[in-house]
Image (cartoon, rainbow, N blue to C red):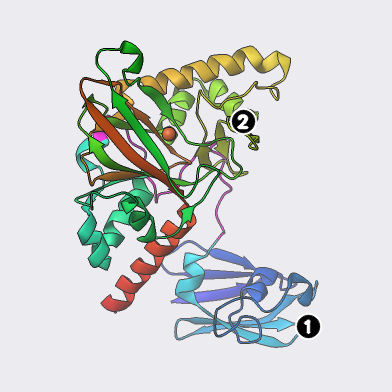
């Protein structure tokens, strides 16, 4: 049984249920979130009013509960709106403000080498033909920021079919996709494939591409494994070791740039560890090749900044943080480029390595996942 009380003046309503904690809601919040046909489009759910359409002195004249619904009459409009109690419980905001810097939502899980046996993997044909398989694989990618697909076609541009599973390719100055191809010549050390430090791609873009797909077409050289590192886990380990070092990398912007081809001068100014205003860890940017002269750290903090940057790099290079796998032709992996760093181990010996890469965006992936999950829920009802 849920009871409702209204404070003096009618600016706040309080719902008290037998089991749960009290939930307070402001009159203006409730009015703004009414779902009647004049407030929201019955067709697409979009709001039809602006904040300026609401009286500044909106207040609750009366309220009652029956049949799982809260019914509120607002003054001075004399308008009545109904709210589903379940919806109110899911959207309640009456809780203490977050005080932790670097918190992450329950929907994601940070990881280290221990993820190896649980790395989200699926067969290309399965996710292409079975929505439930696609849903489960995308859920893994959303949770861990990385996933592998196996058994795909061994043909150029197959990676575009992977992007089309959930969204759209993000075209850049490198084209719709780009080639990552090296011939290994064992008689000349200069042509030995060098390893690359784990990095996020294109930190010099604003916004950065939020997903990257790397698709293997040939991989007969010795070595050349791919490895991935959870940038959120690395950032949180830095915070546990030295909170001041974590803070300095969140507090100041780094500078990134790429001007490696004619007509292109990409620059960005963003922190290596980015927090939302409420402290949520939302992005990591880390790329030794694209970091420009850092000029936005005050003189007094530059030495600390570099100590923090060095330690973050050591953590990223720590083998206990990395998950390693070798792709066979027709296999690919996807990373959340705002979070998970990728790298290539060095390779040698006769053979060739040919990957194609492209960018896409996470909003499309999360949208596809949410719609597949909603279909699953509807089917279960
Ligand atoms: Fe890369």
Q: Which residues are magenta?
A: 93-114
Left or right: 53 in relation to 335: right
How many angstroms separate mark 2 from mark 1 (CA)? 60 Å
The residue beneath circle 1 is 76
Left or right: 114 in relation to 253: left
Dominant SS of magenta comes to: loop
Instruction: Name the mark nearer the viewer: 2 or 1.
Output: 2
Q: Position of residue 95 (x, y in %)?
A: 55, 54
The residue beneath circle 2 is 259
Which of the two labelled residues, at mark 2 and mark 1, occupies the earlier sequence position? 1
Q: Is residue 307 above or below residue 12?
A: above
Q: Is residue 112 above or below residue 216?
A: above
Is residue 370 visible to us here?
Answer: yes
Name the quadrant where ligand 1 sits: top left
**Residue drawn at 39 percent across, 24 percent down:** 196
Is residue 212 visible to us here?
Answer: no
């Amino acid at each position: 049984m849920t009871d409702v009380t209204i404070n003096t003046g009618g600016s706040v309503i309080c719902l008290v249920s037998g089991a749960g904690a009290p939930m307070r809601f402001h009159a203006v919040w409730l009015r703004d979130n009414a779902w009647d046909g004049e407030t929201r489009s019955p067709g697409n759910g979009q709001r039809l009013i602006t904040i300026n359409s609401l009286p500044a002195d909106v207040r609750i004249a009366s309220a009652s509960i029956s049949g799982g619904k809260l019914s509120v009459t607002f003054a001075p409009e004399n308008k009545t709106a109904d709210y589903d109690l379940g919806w109110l419980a899911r959207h309640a905001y009456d809780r203490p403000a977050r005080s932790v810097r670097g918190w992450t939502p329950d929907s994601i899980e940070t990881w280290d080498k221990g993820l190896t046996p649980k790395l989200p993997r699926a067969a290309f044909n399965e996710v292409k033909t079975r929505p439930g398989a696609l849903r489960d694989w995308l859920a893994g990618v959303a949770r861990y920021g990385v996933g592998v697909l196996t058994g795909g076609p061994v043909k150029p541009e197959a990676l575009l079919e992977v992007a089309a599973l959930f969204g759209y390719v993000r075209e850049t100055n490198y084209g719709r996709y780009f080639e990552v191809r090296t011939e290994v010549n064992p008689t000349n050390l200069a042509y030995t494939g060098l390893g690359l430090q784990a990095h996020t791609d294109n930190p010099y873009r604003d916004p950065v591409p939020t997903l990257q797909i790397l698709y293997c077409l040939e991989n007969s050289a010795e070595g050349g494994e791919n490895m991935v590192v959870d940038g959120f886990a690395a950032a949180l380990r830095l915070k546990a070791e030295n909170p001041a070092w974590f803070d300095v990398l969140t507090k100041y912007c780094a500078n990134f740039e790429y001007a490696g081809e004619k007509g292109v001068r990409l620059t960005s100014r963003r922190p290596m560890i980015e927090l939302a205003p409420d402290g949520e860890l939302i992005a990591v940017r880390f790329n030794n090749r694209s970091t420009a002269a850092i000029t936005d750290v005050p003189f007094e903090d530059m030495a600390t900044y570099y100590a923090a940057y060095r330690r973050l790099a050591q953590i990223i290079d720590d083998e206990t943080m990395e998950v390693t796998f070798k792709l066979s032709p027709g296999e690919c992996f996807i990373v959340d480029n705002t979070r998970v760093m990728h790298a290539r181990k060095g390779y040698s010996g006769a053979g060739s390595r040919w990957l194609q890469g492209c960018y896409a965006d996470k909003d499309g992936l999360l949208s596809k996942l949410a719609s597949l999950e909603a279909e699953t829920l509807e089917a279960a009802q």
